[in-house]
Image (cartoon, helix red, strand yellow):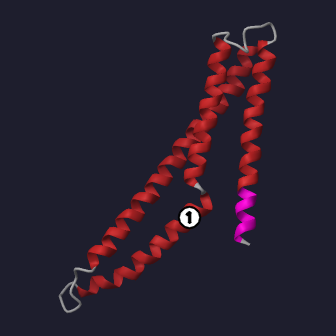
Amino acid sequence: MDEAVYIESRLDDQIDWYERKSTLNKRRYQGCQFLLLALAALITLSALIDSTSDYSRLLILVPVMGALIALITGILRIYKYQENWTTYRTTAELLKYEKYMFITKTRPYDGSNAFNILVQRVEGLISKENAEWMQYMSKDESQQN
């Protein structure tokens, strides 16, 4: 595989994947956090409802909102949106860094062995991220059991 094919089919593809996954996890994390804040605020505001008023039926929503808070908190813990967001973003940025260093022939890519060094470093970053993800996921599962 030559340099152009590797950069296009492997490196750029991985950068794109990590960026898309980072963005997706960021949106999910921030969406869940927004819902948690909104539900907590609504529960607080429900204290203003008099149990004898015409709006007293709305008080039944308080335990529903509390249950939704518990559910969303569990989803955040299980799917680890924040952790995935930051890890994927970091990996994407490191891959881009390696690519730009290679393109500009900046050390360590200034010698005749530059392409081999690029492949080793890129594949090392991807393997490291995958191994850390597996370790993190299995660690959390063992803590839940």
Q: Position of residue 74 (x, y in %)?
A: 56, 68
What main secondary structure does the magenta stretch of the protein show?
A: helix
Tell me the quarter of the picture where residue 78 sits.
bottom right
Tell whether 91 sits left or right of 64: right
Magenta run includes residue 111 = no
Name the amino acid type tagged 1.
Answer: Ile
* Rendered residue at 60%/58% (across/down): 79
Which of the 4 image quarters holds residue 137? bottom right
Viewport quadrant of the N terminus: top right
- Name the residue at 73% across, 28% down: 122
Percent x, y for residue 100? 62, 18
Mark 1 falls on what kind of element? helix
Judge left or right: residue 107 versus residue 25: right
- Give above or below for 20 relative to 95: below
| Residue shown at 67% from the left, 32% from the top | 14
Rendered position, 47 above or below 36:
below
The answer to whether residue 44 shows anywhere in this view is: yes
Mark 1 lies on residue: 75
Among the 4 quarters of the image, the one containing residue 103: top right
Residue 2 in view in this figure: no
Point out the stretch of residues depicted in magenta.
137-144
Label 1 crowd (10 A; few <14 / some 14-19 / many >=20): some
For this orientation, the residue located farthest to the bottom is: 52
* Number of marks in picture: 1
